[in-house]
Amino acid sequence: MKLNLYVLTPKRIIWDCEVKEIILSTNSGQIGVLPNHAPINTAVDMGPLRIRLLNDQWLTAVLWSGFARIVNNEIIILGNDAELGSDIDPEEAQQALEIAEANMSRAEGTKELVEAKLALRRARIRVEAVNWIPPSN
Amino acid sequence: MSCSHLTTAWSSSALASSASTRRSGGRLVVRCSLRELRSRIDSVRNTQKITEAMKLVAAAKVRRAQEAVVSSRPFSEALVEVLYNMNQEIQTEDIDLPLTRIRPVKKVALVVLTGERGLCGSFNNNVLKKAESRIDELKQLGLDYTVISVGKKGNAYFLRRPYIPTERTLEVNGIPTVKDSQSICDLVYSLFVSEEVDKVELLYSKFISLVRSDPIIQTLLPMSPKGEICDINGVCVDATEDELFRLTTKEGKLTVEREKVKIETQPFSPVVQFEQDPVQILDALLPLYLNSQILRALQESLASELAARMSAMSSATDNAIELRKNLSIIYNRQRQAKITGEILEIVAGADALA
């Protein structure tokens, strides 16, 4: 059994292919989705999306919040933006994280602090996505 | 010299306007020297080349703008389908969301989408005029208002009119992206949720054809949870009907086809579960929808601007061609008259000597 995964953004289709398994970060924690999953609707949180391909290789993508619907082995993920792990430059991601950390320590006022926190979280997720080592099984 | 720029300009415009004034215009131009006429013909030719190039550039850009719309289609289709399904599933539940809450209207935010550049006919003026008339309407209703201007032309307009309260001015460079729409989305979202404004209206040019675009006003917030697109009078269109424009060539000329696409909505399955509270899910879904609506409006506005520029530049080229033709006729007449005069002088001189 296979899953049809669609990751759609207004700009382009990020992913449109059959997969074996995905791990999705939802608002209520990460969920793993295998074929014949119960049909659900869920809000997607900012976080990594792990994809197991048909040849058992793992891939990572980054989602910036959105919505997912799983019905009849079809997963539709809608988001304003998403990135594939392979499109992220590790060095650039690391630099962005350092800048975000520096901004965080300098932030003053509630609004700035919230923005800095958000930016830091985004940067962390990107670095994590790049450096993730897939489970070997 | 006797021929100032003003007189040439006047005579040539008289020439271009109608055939009957050609003679009087011709007489006026007689005061010009041949050399000046020649330089004017050259300058008109240069202008014609430039306007022609601008027309082609605009045409190429329309095509790219259209590609952007096409590439966002899978997303918007899936979004509308999901929203439609969600709506079926939660109809029985009583849901209170900040984005759909209808409050008595005291203050309205008007988002005005204009172009980044001029030289596109009355495109920007049409939008701004519509904005003015809407502002007057709001004033008459005794409502407070604020303007969010998107696009350089609108920004300059509202900057010159400090009596119109302007919340923020934004710019969009090139093809509108999610980032551009997101910044507008964030702004109207925070204004609406913080109850600073009670209604958000979006004013943009709807792309109808290459020669026509209508400024329309659409209510952005409060949103109808069904995902309908409503205008200010509350007339709603079902969002599952979507129009797509396509630039094609017909007999060597560019034309536009508008396609109406009805998105297939599958019958909903009652077994679908909600991982979270339906409110939370709609909370994730509606901002996406709001964003995609704003993005769509930005794209339509850009397409209208480029189309307006294309037709403006096309008529400018036509005018330049006609002006050049008329100027050439005058130039040739003058040259002929001068040669005739010289021959007469020579003949008369020779006669006198004989």
Image (cartoon, rainbow, N blue to C red):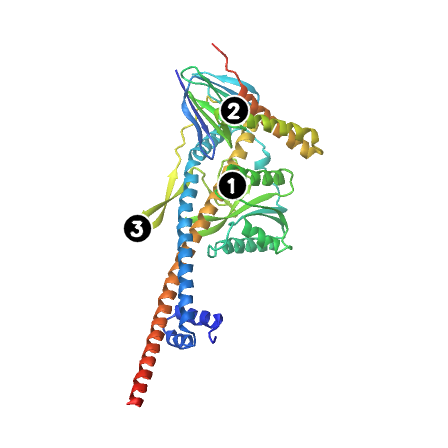
Chain at tag 1? B
- Identified at 52% across, 35% down, the residue is B225
Mark in the foreground, 1 or 3: 3
Return the residue at label 2: A42
Quadrant location of residue B17? bottom left
Does the rendering let one see residue A46? no
Q: Residues within 10 Å of mark 1 (few under 14, many from 20)?
A: many
Name which residue type carries label 3: Gly
Q: Identify which residue, B186 or B194, lies in the foreground.
A: B186
How far is disc 1 from disc 2 in space, using C-alphas?
Answer: 24 Å
How far is disc 1 from disc 3 in space, using C-alphas?
Answer: 34 Å
Q: Position of residue B21 (x, y in %)?
A: 39, 74
Return the residue at label 3: B252
Q: What is the number of callouts on the image?
A: 3
A8 relative position to B251: left or right: right
Q: Position of residue A62 (x, y in %)?
A: 52, 25
Of the residues under marks 1 and 3, which one precedes in the sequence?
3
Mark in the foreground, 2 or 3: 3
Q: Identify which residue, B292 or B38, lies in the foreground.
A: B38
**Is residue B329 positioned above or below B287 on the image?**
below
Name which residue type carries label 1: Ile
